[in-house]
């Protein structure tokens, strides 16, 4: 029978992701609107976005946080173009975005000493192949495959290369081994349900040392430049952004950070996301026609949860459309480059009750199209 109870919030997109529970745009600090990002109030808000991020995440002393253009992609490109080339590079890819970094490093930067280590969707590559004397580029959570790293034991404490981690769907949702990571990037529109267009760039002291001692043999666009006269542009990490940010988006981000604190901090957000995954796992365990794309349970993402169905691609598409037409689940189709299936966001901005209400609808929609 067709279910009668719908999720209160049907937004299960993996980016931009659902706004936090109780979100009200009118409650944002709208005093920032219409003000210059270089005004006292604008710079103070941007500086707070950096310092509060470090505080909420519990970053090690000396790690710098900056707001940069171009979302997570912009932050990653800035890091790769500014830092890579001094040492050989090991780059790991097991889904669309990791594969994208491989392409950029080999086809755009055209670096020669590159080792690409890959795996198919649903699997994790052999991370032990990372050479501690090389720079290493990788995602922490494969947003389009639902496969995450479950540890950083493969990263040597005495490494001489840098670790550059795309963590856009992991930060605020998974335990991050900060001391093992030299560059971390993410975007507001993922785990915090913020707005798009802005990236966050976190640098360890080792990354700063590289920036100040190595000049890449390539031209750098203005929005990629992190140094001037051989020194880090400290202003980027103090609220003086490279280009003009949206102050409405900044206010929205600060609201999301406050919410994380209100629910008990990052550990509470991680727990909430893991509990959401548990709701979905229980459904998969008892439902024969659906399975996780991630083969190893330890590597199953608790944010971008990806599924395979025993339907052909056309029927999967019909099922997803049916759920959207019923207004019970929006934007849950697999990423365009991923195998046909479903992808349901389970980060902390999603309520477990909404996932529980969704599950009978999945059963109904499947039976409608099968």
Image (cartoon, rainbow, N blue to C red):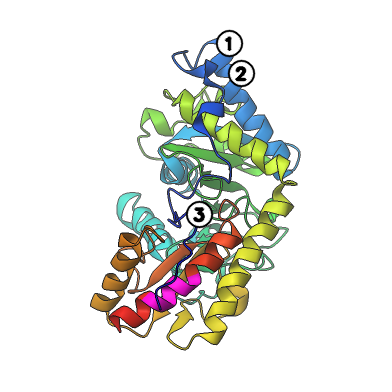
Is residue 360 magenta-colored?
A: yes
Q: Quadrant of residue 63?
A: top right
State the quadrant of the N terminus: bottom left
Within 10 angstroms of label 1, few (less than 14), some, or many (20 or more) residues?
few
Within 10 angstroms of label 2, few (less than 14), some, or many (20 or more) residues?
some
Residues under numbered marks 1 and 3 in contact, where contact means CB atoms less than 8 Å apart: no
Residue name at image x 44 percent, y 68 percent: 145
Residue name at image x 27 percent, y 78 percent: 315
| Residue 198 horizontal/vertical position (percent) | 45, 36
Residues under numbered marks 2 and 1 in contact, where contact means CB atoms less than 8 Å apart: yes
Q: Is residue 184 left or right of residue 269?
A: left
Exactly how many numbered labels are in the figure?
3
The magenta region covers 359-364
User: Considering only vertical position in the picture, is 48 above or below 199?
Assistant: above
- Counting residues from the N terminus, which is met first, the one under dot 1 or under dot 3? 3
Measure the C-alpha gap from mark 2 to mark 1: 6 Å
Q: Which residue is mark 3?
A: 8
Quick one: SS at disc 3? loop
């Amino acid at each position: 029978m067709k279910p009668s109870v719908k999720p209160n919030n049907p937004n299960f997109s993996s980016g931009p992701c659902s706004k936090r529970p109780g979100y009200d745009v009118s409650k944002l600090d709208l005093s920032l609107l219409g003000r210059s990002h270089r005004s006292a109030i604008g710079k103070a808000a941007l500086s707070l976005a950096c310092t509060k991020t470090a505080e909420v995440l519990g970053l090690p002393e000396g790690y710098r946080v900056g707001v940069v253009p171009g979302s997570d992609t912009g932050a990653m490109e800035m890091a790769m173009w500014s830092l890579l080339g001094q040492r050989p590079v090991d780059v790991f890819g097991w889904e669309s975005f990791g594969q994208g970094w491989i392409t950029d490093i080999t086809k755009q930067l055209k670096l020669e000493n590159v080792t690409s280590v890959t795996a198919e969707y649903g699997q994790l590559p052999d991370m032990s192949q990372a050479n501690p004397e090389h720079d290493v580029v990788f995602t922490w959570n494969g947003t389009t495959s639902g496969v995450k790293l479950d540890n950083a034991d493969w990263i040597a404490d005495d490494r001489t290369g840098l670790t550059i981690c795309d963590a856009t769907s992991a930060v605020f949702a998974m335990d991050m081994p900060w001391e093992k990571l030299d560059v971390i990037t993410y975007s507001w529109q993922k785990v915090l349900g913020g707005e798009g267009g802005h990236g966050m760039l976190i640098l360890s002291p080792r990354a700063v040392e590289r920036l100040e001692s190595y000049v890449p043999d390539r031209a750098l666009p203005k929005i990629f430049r992190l140094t001037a006269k051989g020194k880090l542009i400290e202003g980027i990490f103090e609220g003086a952004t490279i280009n003009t940010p949206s102050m409405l988006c900044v206010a929205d981000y600060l609201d999301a950070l406050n919410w994380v604190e209100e629910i008990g901090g990052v550990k509470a957000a991680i727990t909430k996301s893991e509990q959401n995954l548990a709701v979905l796992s229980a459904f998969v365990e008892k439902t024969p026609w659906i399975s996780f794309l991630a083969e190893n349970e330890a590597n199953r993402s608790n944010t971008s949860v990806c599924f395979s169905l025993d339907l052909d691609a056309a029927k999967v598409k019909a099922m997803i459309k049916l759920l959207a037409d019923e207004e019970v689940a929006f934007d849950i189709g697999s990423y365009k480059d991923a195998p046909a299936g479903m992808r349901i966001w389970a980060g902390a901005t999603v309520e477990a009750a909404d996932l529980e209400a969704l599950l009978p609808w999945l059963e109904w929609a499947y039976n409608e199209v099968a």
